[in-house]
Image (cartoon, rainbow, N blue to C red):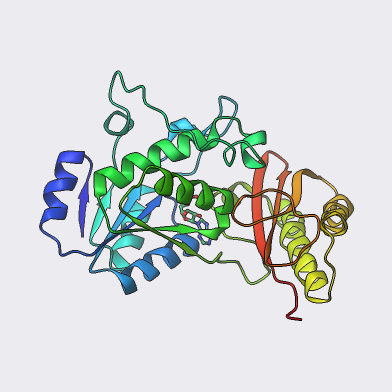
Amino acid sequence: MKVVETVGDLRKTLAEYPRLIGLVPTMGYLHQGHLSLVRRCRADCATVAVSIFVNPTQFGPDEDYQRYPRDVPGDLSLCENAGVDVVFAPTVEQMYPPGDSTLIEVQGLQDRWEGEVRPGHFRGVATVVAKLLRMVCSERAYFGEKDFQQLQVVRRMVRDLVLDVEIVGCPTVRDEDGLALSSRNAYLSADERQRALALSRALQTAQQMVAGGEQHGVKLTAMMRSIVAQTGALQLDYAAVVDPGTLEPVEVLSQEARALIAARVGTTRLIDNAALVPPAE
Ligand code: AMP
């Protein structure tokens, strides 16, 4: 496995590897969720590249950029064991050289849900993902459904900018008790972790209600809210039932929709989502 830090070395190194190349962009502190993307990429592609970069432009001024968990040596050994060929671990200066002033906005999609709570977040995401895609020039790039809005923002950007890459979405990996794996779970105390289970419980209940014939977005979101409220010590940012492509709220489910939920547990923000599939008629 080769580890490179500069765009020049990345290009030179990748030229020695066979196509088709797959990229798995990450912010590091890797867990089984990230590794599921790597496994999928390994199965699909001749060459697997992983980027590890905690992207400052997607964090707000009061967010956790400085304290975001980092463990590059641990990440490299997980990558090595997972059969990664090339790790790109650039410095901030490599990604944002002095004078860099270009930003990418995916208007509309970037403004709702996470974008409302974290203004500028998706501008940072779209900008860094566009740079990574141009630097690696992979045929495919793998993203988790865990960050469902991010996946849709990236898909839209790739379509609108005619970037020559296929975006592959991969299912959310959860702990046995249902909690979606996240690098930020490292912040949770045992008690907070227990409370955080309300998010996946709310989503599961929504799935069951929809499977049982419930079609009304407002009833589903009211139920999700009440599960979070009953748990206590959780601050809900939003619970929504949306169209998977536009992320606009759905009033009456006639086809597959997505339930989105985000809450703060202590000082930690957690997000989760799930597909809502109405029963076949
Ligand atoms: P991050 O390091 O949090 O930026 O995540 C890097 C990639 O891993 C993103 O595409 C995430 O959606 C994906 N990811 C994070 N957690 C999970 C999970 N529990 N299951 C599947 N994919 C995940």
Residue under the point 66% across and 58% down: 273
Q: Quadrant of residue 143?
A: bottom left
Give the quadrant of residue 109. top right
Pick the residue in front: 241 or 132.
241
Q: Percent x, y for residue 277?
A: 70, 71
**How many circles with numbers are drawn on the protein?**
0
Q: Residue at x 83, y 70 (%)?
A: 209
Is residue 269 shown left or right of residue 253? left
Image height check: is 209 above or below 168? below
Residue extending furthest toward the top: 99
Residue 237, position in %: x, y? 74, 41
Residue 190 in view (yes/no): yes
Residue visible at 79% across and 65% down in the picture: 206
Q: Quadrant of the N terminus?
A: bottom left
Q: Is residue 19 left or right of residue 197?
A: left
Quarter occupied by residue 14: bottom left
Q: Residue at image x 28%, y 20%?
A: 98
> Residue 67, can we see it?
no
The residue lying furthest to the bottom in this view is 281
Query: Up-down: is 281 above or below 194?
Result: below
Image coords of residue 51 (percent x, y): 33, 49
Q: Quadrant of the C terminus?
A: bottom right
Question: Closer to the camera, 81 or 141?
Answer: 141
Q: Position of residue 21 (x, y in %)?
A: 25, 61
